[in-house]
Amino acid sequence: MNTLVTGGAGFIGSLLSAALISRNNKVSVLDNLSTGKREKVGDSIKFYQGDLRDRAFVKRVIVEEKPEIIYHLAAQASVPESLKNPVEDADINIIGTLNLLDLAVEYQVKKVVFASSAAVYGIPRYLPIDESHPVEVLSGYAVSKFTVEQYLSVYKYLYGLDYTVLRYANVYGPGQSSAAEGGVVAIFKQNILDDKAPVIFSDGEQTRDFIFVQDVVEANLAAMTLGSGKVINISTGKSTTINSVLKLLQGICEKQCSPVYHSARSGDIRDSVLDNKLAEEVLAWQASYSLEKGLKILIDKIS
């Protein structure tokens, strides 16, 4: 299959691109390198550096590469940045995506697989959160993700452009930057290695659904041919406290460091865990990495 990965020089996108190549797909990558790294893109992958908001550039990529499937992972992914500069956030995540969708229709792309987020659910009304849970967007970032989901539905209805939306839980794994928004595992890992006290907001008993990046990659691969027109949670379905994550990492690294507890941040959600039954049913996919196994791989990669 001929595929294009936007954001393919980033954490998830680079691993997805490598997995696509290993399964004998033709892969090209589009990335503006605002957070991605050029060295993460394999030599067998055609790389295009540029911005989705540059319609002429995106058109050139699609005309030259003729993708059948587009994996759309490129985004402004910082929640604080989306609140600080909502116009820029919307310009990148919504207008840039519309350029991509318009050209996908024009040049007969078969399907778009879109990386969305659990952020669209806002404060959970019940747990675990399934796909029918009400949407309550609480940041510009969440607005942009949900808006793109809605546009995908419109483009399928009007133009027949197929899609699958994958709403990720908290993704972690090798290659994630400790500066990344939401990358608490990467931040803790770096703190422990640097003998620096990790900062935990609130009491650390808040919970999240941590999913290993390779499981996310496998879900994307499944979505190439499955999940038509669906919005699907990609998660472990298991909740873990922030304190427990730190304790596991300390045990694996065999290093102890006492965390510093700060007041809860405004807007932070107390508990979140996603129901993943639909992914199992529609994508024939299940998360295969326990948190402990994923963390061991993460630490082994840097040992």
Image (cartoon, rainbow, N blue to C red):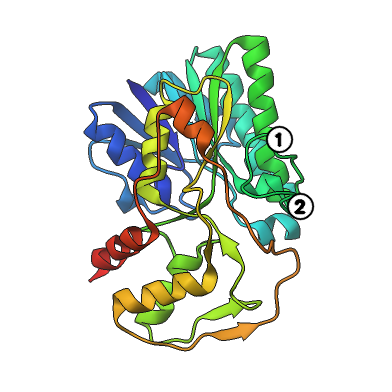
> What amino acid type is highlighted by mark number 2?
Leu
Q: Secondary structure at mark 2?
A: loop
Residue 14 falls left or right of residue 185: left
Q: Secondary structure at mark 1?
A: helix
* Front one among 295 and 194: 295
The x and y percentages for residue 202 are 66, 77
Look at the image and tell me in which quarter the N terminus lies.
Answer: top left
Residue 221 is drawn in which quadrant? top left
Residue 69 falls left or right of residue 298: right
Residue beneath disc 1: 147
Q: Considering only order in the chain, which callout, 1 or 2, is on the residue closer to the N terminus?
A: 2
Q: Residues within 10 Å of mark 1 (few under 14, many from 20)?
A: some
Residue at (29, 68) in percent of width and height: 299
> What amino acid type is highlighted by mark number 1?
Thr
Where residue 138 is drawn, which disc sits there?
Answer: 2
Residue at (35, 32) in percent of width and height: 28
The x and y percentages for residue 3 are 38, 26
Residue 192 is drawn in which quadrant? bottom left
